[in-house]
Image (cartoon, helix red, strand yellow):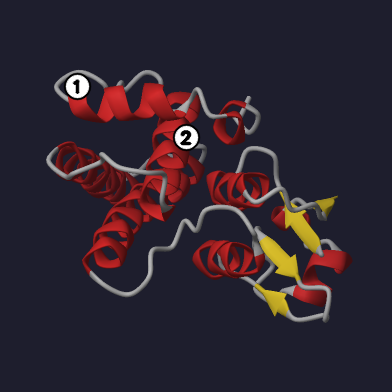
Amino acid sequence: MKLHFSGTSPYVRKCVAVAKHHGLSMEHVPANPAQNPASLLADNPLCKVPSFVTDDGLALNDSPVICEYLDHIGTGAKLFPAPGPARWQALAIAVLADGILDAAVPRRGASMLPQDEGRQAADARFKAAMTRAVDALEGMDLSGPLDIGKVGVVCALGYLDFRYAHEPWRPGHPKLEACYEAQMQNPIFAETKPG
């Protein structure tokens, strides 16, 4: 198995955390998508990380799919609950966590470009989406065993700490902070912290 990765990508972190949870090993291939590396393009025409290649040579190119595949082949406690209410709750949380990243990652990229009215409006929209998602997560049930929703939450909040420390998410979110701090004791998160 092979994973094209960037060490600061929160999407990659999710995949690595799931692999660690299950004790799975894989080859890690550093890739900077901005440089269009041939090895990444060979496995992912979208030139994005994470990009994962199974032992059978199948390329999987999106973190939710990669995480589900790793959970499927892993022998540890399943992170994707069986169909039913627990699964839908975990996936609802996972989607909100991914939504934070889907706003935070391009927002950061755009912040390095010359600012004009259009970019400022986009920044405000992304920031508002991030804030609303964090607020929504505060009101959700984050108790119970580790699942893919909590994996996503830890990776999203860790990315906010890493890239948006000047916009702290903790004030007003005590349940979310408690969940995050408790999960950070787990080596799969402590060992994958960006920075």
The image position of residue 65, as x and y in percent, is 54, 70
Query: Image height check: is 171 above or below 19?
Result: above
Q: Residue at x 57, y 62 (%)?
A: 71
Q: Is residue 169 visible?
A: no
Residue type indicated by callout 2: Tyr
Q: CA distance from mark 2 to mark 1?
A: 18 Å
The image position of residue 85, as x and y in percent, is 21, 66
Q: Which mark is residue 174?
A: 1
The image position of residue 49, as x and y in percent, is 66, 58
Q: Which residue is mark 2?
A: 159
| Frontmost residue, 72 versus 7 | 72
Residue type indicated by callout 1: Pro
Kindly indicate the quadrant of the structure image that contains residue 4: bottom right
SS type, badge 2: helix
Task: Please give left or right for residue 180 compared with residue 163 in the image.
Answer: left
Q: Residue at x 25, y 30 (%)?
A: 176
Task: Please give left or right for residue 50 compared with residue 1 in the image.
Answer: left
Q: Residue at x 29, y 47 (%)?
A: 126
